[in-house]
Image: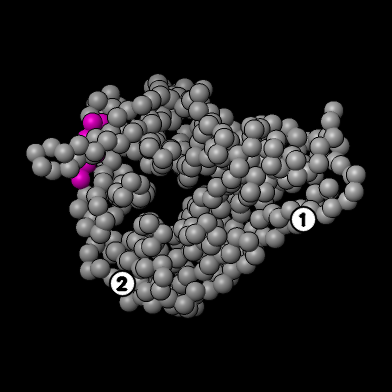
């Protein structure tokens, strides 16, 4: 049984054709593709699959199938964190991977299409097998470009571009099938309400405009988050909050604003709770839709140990843990060392005096990157994947 991969957009499908007594030969043994898919692949690590891809292109195509990734995720335990970071004075961002045991960032050697020089304004969408990088600024102008970073093969490929150039947009994945991109339009033509939302179908690799109702055209979206796959919260650059059910896409201005939206970033939804990063090393939380933010307790020792530090990225590390990143300077003088620190935090709910509080427990913290040849860094994206 031979395997052949058909690529539409950036998604892959396997077409199997039955041929009697025909097998694919790989290395020292001969294994039919279907046996490899359903018996061997779930037991192999990501590095094993990459090694097989160097031996057989047919096996490489099998390894990137969505079904294979789902099977492997049921049996794998290693959780790798991927970081997309611009380190000055390098002209372009780079991908790094944080090993779950070594706790050090290592650069990813990319295959195929190089990562574009998008240093600001891009939005990112995680899937079970990689990350979409959507829009952003190229030479100071918004772009329609979309790329996909494959976390198994460490490849970057072009995806069908959007219909409208966007920077400062927000994006989310709904039902594991479609990516919705909101706002980020920079001119009057692109800012028309009929162009405000585009939808990308992962299977077909096509973009379509989505008709939505909104009382205001928030061109640049500062934050967005999906609640239970049922509602989308979006905050524009003025701090105004918009909410829409995913069943009918009618954005409603709630009449509430974030008083200082620049100090409440990286919104994420976990365990029925909204979290974001504040200033002074604080993590904030609230129950939607009230948006009455409170501080996560238990991080005082970390805040005192790194006096004056600000979290530059808050993200989910696993189902029961979060991760925070911050920048530090390891030494003074001409050879000053630039350090990137990370801490993994588990959250615990505690009733105190009839009031529910959330406490953070530091599971691990340390420097994950130390460099003396760079003057600064911009952490653009962080996401975790089983491999």
**Which image quadrant is residue 217 in?**
bottom left
Q: Residues within 10 Å of mark 2 (few under 14, many from 20)?
A: some
Residue furthest to the front in view is 20
Of 344 and 334, nearer the camera is 344
Q: Which residue is mark 2?
A: 252
Callout in the foreground (2, 1):
1
Residue 161 visible (yes or no): yes
Is 307 situated left or right of 84 in this image? left
For the residues marked 2 and 1, what is the alpha-carbon distance in whole angstroms?
45 Å
Magenta stretch, overall SS = loop
Of 46 and 103, nearer the camera is 46
Which residue is located at x 59 percent, y 68 percent?
A: 207
Whether residue 9 appears in magenta in the rendering, the answer is: no
Q: Position of residue 100 (x, y in %)?
A: 50, 28
Which residue is located at x 52 percent, y 69 percent?
A: 198
- For marks 2 and 1, the one nearer the N-term is 1
| SS assignment at label 1 | strand
Q: Position of residue 58 (x, y in %)?
A: 80, 44
State whether residue 302 is above or below residue 322: above
Q: Residues within 10 Å of mark 1 (few under 14, many from 20)?
A: few
Residue bounds of the magenta highlight: 294-299
Of 56 and 164, nearer the camera is 56
Is 201 situated left or right of 242 in this image? right
| SS assignment at label 2 | strand
Residue 271 has which mark?
Answer: none
Which residue is located at x 21 percent, y 58 percent?
A: 290
Q: Position of residue 227 (x, y in %)?
A: 36, 57
Residue furthest to the left in view is 353
Q: Which residue is mark 1?
A: 15
- Would you say the residues marked 2 and 1 are in contact, meaning their CB atoms lie under 8 Å apart? no
State whether residue 160 is above or below residue 91: below
State whether residue 196 is above or below residue 141: below
């Amino acid at each position: 049984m031979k395997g052949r991969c058909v690529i539409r957009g950036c998604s892959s499908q396997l077409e199997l054709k039955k041929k009697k007594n025909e097998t694919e030969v790989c290395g020292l043994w001969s294994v039919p593709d279907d046996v490899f898919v359903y018996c061997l692949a779930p037991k192999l690590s990501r590095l094993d699959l990459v090694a097989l891809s160097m031996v057989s292109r047919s096996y490489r195509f099998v390894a990137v199938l969505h079904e294979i990734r789902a099977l492997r995720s049921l049996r794998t335990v290693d959780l790798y964190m991927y970081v997309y970071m611009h380190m000055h004075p390098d002209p372009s961002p780079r991908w790094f991977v944080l090993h779950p045991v070594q706790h050090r960032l290592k650069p990813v050697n990319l295959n195929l299409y190089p990562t574009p020089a998008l240093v600001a304004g891009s939005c990112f969408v995680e899937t079970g097998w990689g990350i979409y990088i959507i829009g952003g600024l190229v030479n100071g102008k918004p772009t329609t470009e979309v790329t996909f970073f494959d976390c198994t093969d460490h490849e970057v490929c072009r995806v069908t571009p959007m219909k409208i150039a966007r920077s400062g947009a927000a994006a989310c994945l709904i039902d594991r099938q479609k990516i919705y991109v909101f706002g980020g339009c920079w001119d009057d033509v692109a800012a028309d309400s009929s162009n405000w939302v585009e939808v990308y179908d992962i299977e077909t690799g096509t973009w379509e405009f989505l008709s939505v109702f909104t009382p205001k055209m928030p061109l640049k979206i500062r934050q967005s988050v999906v609640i239970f796959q049922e509602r989308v919260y979006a905050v524009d650059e003025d701090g105004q909050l918009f909410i829409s059910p995913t069943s009918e896409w009618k954005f409603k201005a709630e009449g509430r604003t974030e008083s200082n939206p620049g100090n409440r970033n990286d919104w994420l939804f976990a365990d029925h709770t909204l979290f974001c990063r504040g200033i002074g090393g604080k993590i904030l939380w609230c129950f939607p839709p009230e948006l009455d933010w409170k501080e996560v307790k238990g991080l005082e020792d970390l805040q005192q140990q790194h006096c004056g530090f600000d979290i530059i990225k808050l993200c989910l590390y696993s189902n029961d843990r979060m991760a925070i990143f911050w920048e530090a300077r390891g030494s003074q003088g001409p050879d000053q060392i630039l350090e990137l620190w990370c801490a993994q935090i588990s959250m615990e709910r505690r009733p105190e005096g009839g009031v529910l509080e959330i406490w953070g427990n530091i599971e691990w913290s340390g420097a994950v990157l130390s460099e003396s040849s760079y003057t600064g860094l911009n952490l653009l994206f962080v996401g975790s994947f089983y491999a």
